Amino acid sequence: MKTLVPLDDLAHIIDILAVKPDNQSLRELSRTCKFMVPLCRRHLFSSVRLRSNSNTPKQIGLVHFLSGSPDVACRIKKLSYIVKPHAPSSRQIIDILEVLRSQSTSLQSVSLSSESVRCSDWNALQEPTKSLLISLMQLPTVTHLQLRYLKNFPLVALSLCSNLADISVHNVFEAPSSSYADQIITRSKVPTPVSLRIGDFNFAISVLMRPPGPNIIDPIIDFSCLENASFNICVASDASQMAEILKMVTRLRTLIIDYEDPLQLAGLGSSLATNAYQTLKSVILYLNVDREHFDPLCGLTLALRQLSGHNVLEELDVSVLVETDEPCRTDSDDWSDLDTVLTDQSAFRMLRRVTVKLLWYSYQRDEVQVADLLHKLTADRFPRLLESSAVQFVFNEEHTYI
């Protein structure tokens, strides 16, 4: 006796398989009957990954398939394009991009990146590839944009990405100012993302906030509506650019900052105290320290004092990463000062969770030395947090060989 499975249930099963995603199972399922083909296709072809000079039979077949299947092209949601230096785009790649531009109605995410951590030159791409990629990036359906390891990229193009909600920029160098001289940009809507991730600034954020050239609308991006922000800070100039953004945000809820090098948190508290203190609920910090730093918390307690009083902070997570085989001043008063400022009844009334982690990294230390490290700082240095009934306090100390 045959048992018929309702089409809605099959569609639900397919949606579950697509979460991982399990493309092999989706392909097998699409072969079971003709009714399963359209249900599986919307997931199997939801993402396309292309390379500049790819000229394989697979890419050629994809061109023919997309050209003859507008129902599939219009379902593509994510495009990832790998820029290979000194590699001209194949005709097949250009054809695919043209199909996407003319038929895509669901494209939501565009990622442009180098194939390695070495920056690829955007100018090395030939036309019409550059224009096609920019056109796809500016489609009104696109809400997510990722740019990684690119130089001479025309950041002014983001001014016409009107519906961007999520932006990720990592190690992107803007095109020379002279390239903007003759451009006149007009638009009806300024991009106002709610999520931002920045790594290795290279002054990209400064350009987006204050672009060069007399004909360009200022700013390219309006960051005032950010709700979630993540920054990777390598040098003092990165921290300065971050501070400019933090001063203007009015809806920020979550802030993550990873300080890759030992840097003081000077200016962080005052930046957040401008507007963000009214909405900021969660702060996650990764602090990098070594023997040259007298202050193992890099000025965190001062930054917190500048925020104390009128704030809605609920969660603070601090990880202190000690440079390989370097010492850390575990006897510093900074640890007890942190305990004091966070438990002041009038300072952080909404605070509910505090996590402090100390991470040691070793290459040459032996087991005895490591055992000694793991007893240098204990939870006892935070007596008021331990006793607090309002705040859940978590302390953790770890060691890793590299």
Image (spheres, grey):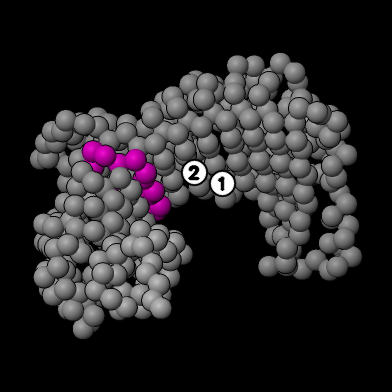
Name the residue at 84% across, 55% down: 373
Name the residue at 16% across, 30% down: 188
The answer to whether residue 337 of the structure is visible from this angle is no
- Across and down, in percent, residue 58 comes to 23, 80
Front residue of 69 and 253: 69
- Across and down, in percent, residue 207 comes to 31, 39
Q: Is residue 229 left or right of residue 184?
A: right
Residue, disc 2: 231
The quadrant of the image that shows the N terminus is bottom left
Name the residue at 39% across, 53% down: 171
Question: For the residue labelled by badge 2, is the local secondary structure a helix, a strand or a loop?
Answer: strand
Where is residue 75, by image quadrant?
A: bottom left
Question: For the residue labelled by badge 1, is the local secondary structure a helix, a strand or a loop?
Answer: strand
- Across and down, in percent, residue 140 comes to 20, 43
Q: Is residue 278 left or right of residue 397?
A: left
- In the image, residue 195 above or below residue 397: above
Part of the protein shown in magenta? 161-177
Where is residue 183, by image quadrant?
A: top left
Q: Residues within 10 Å of mark 1 (few under 14, many from 20)?
A: some
The answer to whether residue 115 of the structure is visible from this angle is yes
Disc 2 marks a residue whose amino acid type is Phe
Disc 1 marks a residue whose amino acid type is Asp
Q: Residues within 10 Å of mark 2 (few under 14, many from 20)?
A: many
Q: Earlier in the sequence, mark 2 or mark 1?
A: 2
Alpha carbons under labels 2 and 1: distance apart: 6 Å
Residue, disc 1: 258
Q: Residue furthest front?
A: 1
Are the residues at dot 2 and dot 1 in contact (C-beta closer than 8 Å)?
yes
- Residue 163 in the magenta stretch? The answer is yes
Q: Is residue 251 left or right of residue 106?
A: right
